[in-house]
Every structure is written in C-alpha cells, then in structure tokens.
Amino acid sequence: MVSGISLKELAAELNLAPSTVSRALNDSYEISEQTKKKVLSMAEKLNYHPNPFARSLRENKSKTIAVIIPERINNFFAQVIDGIESITQEHGYHLLVYCTHEDVEREKKIVSVLLNGRADAIVMSVSSQTSDISHLRKLYDRGLPILFFDRICSEIPTTKFITNDYQSTLEATRHLIQQGCKRPAFLMLSEDISITKERHRGFLAALKEAGIEHNPEFSKVCCQKEERNIEILKELLSKENRPDGILASVEKLALATYQAAKKANVRIPEDLKVISFSNMGIAGLLNPSLTTISQPACCIGEECAKILMKKLTKVNQPDLPNEVITFPSKLTIRASTMAE
Amino acid sequence: MVSGISLKELAAELNLAPSTVSRALNDSYEISEQTKKKVLSMAEKLNYHPNPFARSLRENKSKTIAVIIPERINNFFAQVIDGIESITQEHGYHLLVYCTHEDVEREKKIVSVLLNGRADAIVMSVSSQTSDISHLRKLYDRGLPILFFDRICSEIPTTKFITNDYQSTLEATRHLIQQGCKRPAFLMLSEDISITKERHRGFLAALKEAGIEHNPEFSKVCCQKEERNIEILKELLSKENRPDGILASVEKLALATYQAAKKANVRIPEDLKVISFSNMGIAGLLNPSLTTISQPACCIGEECAKILMKKLTKVNQPDLPNEVITFPSKLTIRASTMAE
DNA sequence: AGAAAATACGCAATCGTTTTCGATTTTATA
DNA sequence: TATAAAATCGAAAACGATTGCGTATTTTCT
C-alpha cells in the first residue's frame, strides 16, 4: 500500500493545525470560508486523500459491506450484486465479495474472518450444504447486521428477501400438468436449504391439487458435480416409468437435464417437459428454449442495499426487523414445456 | 460496525502489557511458551479478534485487492474472479469487487476512490469506453500495483495478462473460411480497446491470407444496448450482399447475432456461420450450439493473483515488470459453424 | 465604552495495533 | 562468585484521522 500525504503534513504545509484542516475538509461551521478555500485548494494541489483506515479506526465503521454467495458463475447472484452495488455505491460504500462454492466449510471460514468487523454488515445467501448454522449465529450475536436473500436462514431473526417460492413453483407445476405431464419430477441441490423446502412444497401441492400421486423417487436430490448430476439424471430418464416433466429448483440442474436428456435420447419437450428457476438471459436461445421462473434479482439486491443503507447511514436505527420480504417471480413459457 | 474486545482489554484481563499480548498472539520469540498459552486461551475465551483497521493503519497495508471489471453478468469475468479468489484467499487477502458496466465515468470514479489506499493492489479489465487513461496513470503514479487482464492498457508499464487474441482470431477466421464463408463480418464493442484491435488484426490477416477482399462495412462497431445491437445486426443481415459469417469479438454480440438472425430470417449455420469469444458454459446447449473461442479464465485469474501475492507478501520485491503474459484460447467447434 | 457573545482556531486525547528501546530477571560462563 | 548473556516483559511512541475543550480574537449589544 502506498500512502500519499497525511493530514498532518497537509496542515504543516498550510501553517494550520491538523484539527483545523480536518474540520475544513469536513466543511465544519467552525471554520471560515476563507480558510476552507485555502485548505481545499491545497488538498487538491497536494493530492490529499484521507486514509480510510485511520477513519475507520476512529469512527468504528468501515463503509464496507460483505456479500457472500454460493457461486459467482450464475446470473442470479451476479444480478443481485449488481443491484446491491447500484445503491451502496451512491452512499460511498464498498463491496467485499466472497464465494463459498456451495461449501459450508468455506462459508464458515469466510464468516469467521468477518467476525473482526472488517465489514459493517453482511448480505448473504447460504450454501446448499449449510444446515448447522452456529457460525451464522456467532455473527448475529456479535451484533453485525446480517441480511439474507434467496437461500435464507430462518433461525436468525433478521430481514430476509426471497421470491414467492411456494406460489411460483405451484404455478409452474400447474403449467407442467396443464401441458400434459403425468409424472413430473422435482430436482434439488439439497434437502436442507430454504428454497428447496418451499419450492418442493409448492410442487407437491400442485400434484395433490391435480390428483397426481407422487413417486418419492421423482424428488431427486442432486449434488455439486455437473458430471455426477448428468449421470443421476440420465439414470432417472432411462427408467421404464420415467418422469415426463422436470421442475429444476435451480438453474444448473436444468442444464444438467438438457445434457442428460441428450444422452438418454429423450426429447424435450416431446418426451420430457422442462421448467426451471433461472435468471439466464439466454434461456430463449437454448435448444429448445427453456421455460423459466425468474426472480427480480436486481430488485432484490437493491432492496437489500436500501434497507442496509438506511440502517447504516442514519442514526438511531432499530435492528433489522425479523421479517421475510417477498418479491414475486415471473414465469416465462418457452418451448421446453410446449405440448405437441 | 460492532467491535468486540480490544487488545488492551485483553491485556488487562491477563495482567499483562498490551505489547506482550500482541507479541504472544503473533508468536514472537520474545514471549515464553507459558504466557503464549495463557494469552491464546484467554483470547479464545474472550473471543478476541484483532481490529483490521488498526492493523492496516499501523502496517500500512490492507490485505485487500480491488478487482474492477466491465460486467458481472459474464462468465469470463466471473471465472477470472473465482481464479483470483482461490489464490488470494489462501493468503488471507480480501477482494473488493467493482463493476464499471462499460462506463468510463464509473471507472474513473471507482479508480479515484481507490487512490486513498483502500486496496493494496488493483486487478482490472478496462471498460470498452476507455481511451483516455489519465485516471489509470494517476493510480500508477501513486505507486499502487496495477495489473491488467483481457482488456489491457498498454500505456501503463506493468504486467498484463491476455489470451493470444491475434492468433486465436486468425485461426477462428480460417475456420470460418474453411467452412465456406466468403464474406465474414467482425463484430466489436469499441474500436479503442486492446482486444478488439488485436482480434480485428487477426481477422483481417486471415482474410488477406485467403485472398478475400474485406468490406469495411463488415467490421461493425456495436454498442452497449442489447436492443440497439440487435437492430444494427438485423440491418446488416438484411442487406442484399449480407455477410455469411460472423466473428463476434465478445460474447454478447454473438447472442445479439442469434436474436438478429431470428428476426431477419437468416438461418444459422446454413445462411450464416457464427463464432464467438465466449466462456459460456452452455454454448453447447444453444440453438444451434455455438462455436466458441474460450479463454482459460480461471487460470488467468490465478496467475494474476499469484504474481500479486508474491509482490505483496514477500519483502523487497521489484515493481511488476512491464510485460504481457499470454494464455492461449481454445477453439471449440460446434454446430454454428457447420458447413452443410 | 465595557461586557457578552460569536467566531475561528489550536491542543491533546482517542481509536487498536505494532514495534523500538529499555528494564528486569534468569541462566550460563569464567 | 561475579559477570556476561539470554530470556521475558513493559513503557511509550507511532500510524492518520476526528473531536471535546480551551482560548484568543473579533463582533455585537446595552
């Protein structure tokens, strides 16, 4: 790190006390306009930039927010971060971004590092492996504002942002059934995380509503490995009484389904209709184009950030309320669920 | 920001001087094993975490690296950051990630904020609008280690990581020509940035080599707006003597081409062969599957980080050498360039 | 004109570390 | 046994900013 001139040096150059210069730069009423002008122009001339760490140390805040996501190569999370940044940036806040790669051990490490106050708040979506949440509780107990989105942790009493997981899955499954599916399957990354629970519930509700008896083997838990998932799905699709519809609770499982269908010689949508939660921009360009349930990701990020900015920049703010805020997803019907 | 117990308080609890506790925690040889044990266990018990800002202030380094990219919703950049993080994380470094959204004004703002030393180094890929580089020079002049990748800034004497832009485009264009293209077009985001210059040069070289006279109107400068690009391309594809091949220098232009081709009723690959620089994981699932030139993105990120870590964690390191390090791209041939 | 109040600025402490320089005690050497 | 040499630890000064308090000067009021 290469630091430039310090406040003290700037003050010396001006024949003023550091306190005066500090106040002048912060536009204090105690300083005359004349001195302010002199200070400002000299600061400009000498290229003075206040040391952020001295300030953080003194003020006990870092103007930094940590964002923890399970994967970076995913449009949804990228869009959420874009949304967050669009708001925090206006307030001069910085974004520390960490990726867990769906690994709870990494998540623990990251969280433990953040215990030291490097960030003023945390926005996160937990990894699919996260069931024990003691590390998150530690954060919370320390008083650090945490905010969850998408994959939330209901045990921590704070504000959470999600989409209408139950309802949108219900409607998506209805759509599958309307398109003629008699044996839809549900794909998930893990049974533990919030979104799969809700989405699975919506899925099952739609089946029940339609009087379809669900085959438990059609609620498939997949893993992180793309190849392994393709194998699992290929096997599923090669069964005698295979599913004729797929609801993928996350995007990567829809893509694995596409690959598996190819390998198993199963045609989409003729033999298998596919629908997935996904914020891919190019769902429409896939072969066949993919029917998606897409979240208002950017919006979710923005709202997260707005709440945080309010909490962090205004005085005497209460703790983040323990509530779940829902943003509805949008179902976009494309070729992958077309009836013949 | 909520801080826990301080070193001083910890020391008081132990009836030791802060200096002793500090040394004990840093495993100094001056402290007896016995006291070290006591200090460690008390630190553990009281949940002590050293304040990173006090440390940064004192040590004049932040253990933070800033990464600036033009867009987040792009697999290439996401992979590069994954690569960077995989290395920096091991060294206890943090990643501050900023996105310019291809806007040079934002880039300038971000860069000016980083002038204060919040980060120990910067890894960046410049926006497509960046031609004036005075803001980058300011950073460099301040002594901050900068490192460029993909879209580099040759005027700044530092280490840059790129792919073999010229060569891979040359080969990709040869492929187009081999597949029967007589009138290939080249799509770019801007004429100014490094990658388009090199890639265009490779493109032209292949045409020359094949004795194809290039129509300057087939070197098309596009913009940021997806809709506008589709319009531009639709127009290009509707001409009487339209191109029969497209080399998109960036991914988003290939996708715009797909959309435009649909609208203009141009079939890929029968009427138009398409090839693009892209790190999309699902290029193979597009309709038709897209022939790509893909960079070893993760590897580029890792190498960036390795060089930086060496520079930042070892003593007496020289400045980053002014050199360009090249990682070859890989051409993956798919349906979009198939001859009938 | 004299007192009160407003204006403009400086001194010094503080935030939580690390580190230099000593000081003291223990151990080893002659 | 006296002395040199390790071995341990403490006091205090940084790092660079902010801020409560004090003070000198000027302005305003009666």
Image (tube, coloured by chain):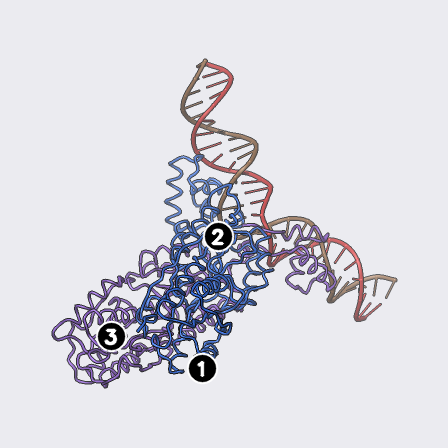
Chain colours: A blue, B purple, C red, D brown
Regarding mark 2 in the picture, which secondary structure is present there?
Answer: strand
CB within 8 Å, label 1 to label 3? no
Q: Quadrant of the C terminus of chain A?
A: bottom left
**Distance of label 3 from label 2 (alpha carbons):** 51 Å
Report the residue that reaches farthest toward the front. A211
Element type at mark 1: loop
Report how far apart the C-alphas of labels 2 and 1 lie in the structure: 42 Å
Residue at 15% across, 80% down: B213
Q: What amino acid is at disc 2? A: Val
Horizontal and vertical percent position of residue B217 = 16, 71
Give the image quarter of residue B260: bottom left
Above or below A205: residue A309: above
Q: Name the residue under label 1.
A: A240
Tell me the residue that label 2 is attached to.
A324
Q: Distance between the residues labelled 1 and 3?
A: 53 Å
Q: Identify the subunit bearing mark 3.
A: B
Task: Give the structural element (helix, strand or loop) at label 3.
Answer: helix
Q: Is residue B146 above or below residue A6?
A: below
Which residue is rendered at x = 53% and y = 51% of the image? A158
Which residue is denoted by mark 3 in the rendering?
A: B200
Asked if one can make out residue B317 in the rendered structure from this viewpoint, the answer is no
